[in-house]
Image (cartoon, grey):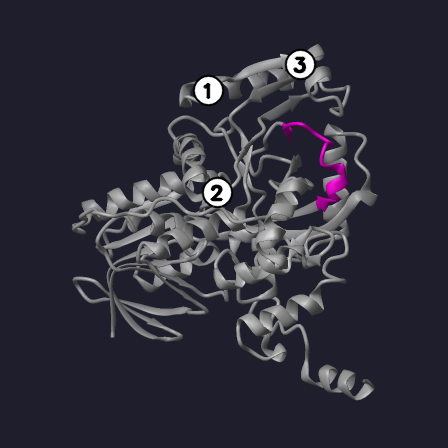
Amino acid sequence: MSIYNVVIIGGGVVGTAIARELSRYRLRTAIFEKEAELAFGVSKSNSGIIHPGTQHSPGTLKGRLCVQGNILTRKLAKELGIDFKRVGELIVAFNDEECKRLLQLKRNGDALGVPGLKIVKGDWLKKNEPNLSREAIAALYAPTAGIISPYRWVYDFAENAVRNGVHIHTGIKVERILHTKPGFEIATSKGIFYAQHVVNAAGLYADEVSRMAGVDDFKIRPRKGEEFLLDKKRENLTRHLLFPLPSKTSKGILVTRTSDGNPMIGPTAEDVDNKEDLSTTQEGLKKVLEGAKRLVPSLNENDIIAYFAGLRPVAGDDFIIRREEKAPGFITVAGIQSPGLTAAPAIALMVVDMLKKDGLEMKKKIFFHKHRKREVHLFSIPLERTEQFIKKDASYGDIVCRCEMVSAKEVRDAIERGAKTMDGIKFRTRAQAGRCHGSFCTTRLLKILSEGATRPILEVTKRGGDSQIVKEDRLIHNVADV
């Protein structure tokens, strides 16, 4: 029988940030994630933007936690060894009416304490953002905006939490929660667990998890966003993250870039009913191109190398983060759409404070391992450093993914750190993320993953479940041909 002080349901950026913060204390803490790996839910389709806090009203959780989270992210990125790139953002205006809205956004940002905000015009825009549309007449410049890898952010939180004693269970679906007064009995697809406290960070399914605990006063509405990734050869397309004026439902169609250098355009914002609908559409592409080209007219559709969609868990205008009176010891963390990635470290501190108020005894550990060794990514280091790594370990010179310059050593390290699937490898290393989409490296990655995870190639999946890469009849056919 497994008994925990705290069970966190949901292994995305919010759940893992909470787990890492709780790992400072002498507690038995666990994460339950229904997918095959962490970061396979809402977090996997995140744009990776660390927002400054310019687009949320003072007095909202989104506004306050975004500003706090931006500061915390810069500190934690150093501790956890992940690249945070501070690139700044521009919210662009095209007419006098939009300029008035820029001034209101600046007033809101100033009230929240966002540093360095200023309105920039004409010559500044031409000099500092040369590919921006000449029709743009002004922009709100926020220098503290940045970019980070959303997947690696999740894995870094999780790995550091595990080093400090947190248990992570993947492929485990919560089926029932009983309030045992005190505490909870949690029935899952892998057996019964007990917890003093439960934190619901289940993303798109947070409403369903809350209902299991007797809380039924909110509903998650999926909002689909289609995004399009451009070839890394266009990495100098923009110098900043470019935003239009926000609407009531989204921040608009953006021109941004990932922390690994690829420009990205999107997302759309379409309310859907299906929590598994990750389809992309021709209409979505058309809408994104139209919005992106308004900002950067030189964008070329032929530079797009990948289409994808994500779902945002909408539960109203603001985050829902609260202790539940109907289920003492149960904390709801729901509706964490943008700026959830930015706010995650601040949400973690807020949840820890709530757990203290709920009576959880929290004694800090004498030794807390707050630092984590930075991984090696050949695509991000100079050639002379790559040569040094190869001299130490020849497998750094065994390039598996040519598009993204990923070595066999990096792939094996990712497996050792927890990658169980092909997407798990891709999210950790970028192997398969280039223009060829794994045409050259898939078979080699299958072999390395099969050997590293000690499982037959037939059991290797893209993302868990029934997403096998090789089916048995195909394997028999190929063997017969040989």
Q: Considering the numbered disc 1 on the image, is that residue within a helix, a strand or a loop?
A: loop
Q: Quadrant of the C terminus?
A: bottom right
Residue 467's place in the image compared with 26, above or below, is below
Q: Identify which residue, 451 or 108, lies in the foreground.
A: 451
Answer with the quarter of the image where residue 380 lies: top right
Please tell me how crowded label 2 is: few (under 14), some (14-19), or many (20+) other residues with Cα within 10 Å: many
Q: Nearer the viewer, residue 415 or 58?
A: 415
Return the residue at label 3.
96
Residue beneath the point at 63% across and 60% down: 408
Residue at mark 2 to residue at mark 1: CA–CA distance: 19 Å
Magenta-span inclusion, residue 238: yes
Residue 91 in the image: state x and y as whole percent. 61, 25
Q: Residue sitting at 59 percent across and 77 percent down?
A: 459
Q: Nearer the viewer, residue 85 or 409?
A: 409
| Amino acid type shown at disc 1 | Pro
Q: How many numbered marks, from 0 up?
A: 3
| Residue 308 vertical placement versus 32 (above, below) | above
The amino acid type of the residue labelled 2 equals Leu
Name the residue that disc number 1 marks: 115
Q: CA distance from mark 2 to mark 3?
A: 32 Å
Q: Earlier in the sequence, mark 2 or mark 3?
A: 3
Return the x and y of residue 131 as percentages of the image width and height.
76, 25
Residue position marked by numbered label 2 in the rendering: 341
The mark nearer the N terminus, 2 or 1, is: 1
**Mark 2 against mark 3, which lies toward the viewer?**
2
Q: Secondary structure at mark 2?
A: helix
Taking the magenta stretch, the answer to whether it contains residue 432 is no
> What is the secondary structure assignment of the residue under circle 3?
helix
Type of amino acid at the residue the image marks with label 3:
Asp
Q: Which residues are magenta?
A: 229-244
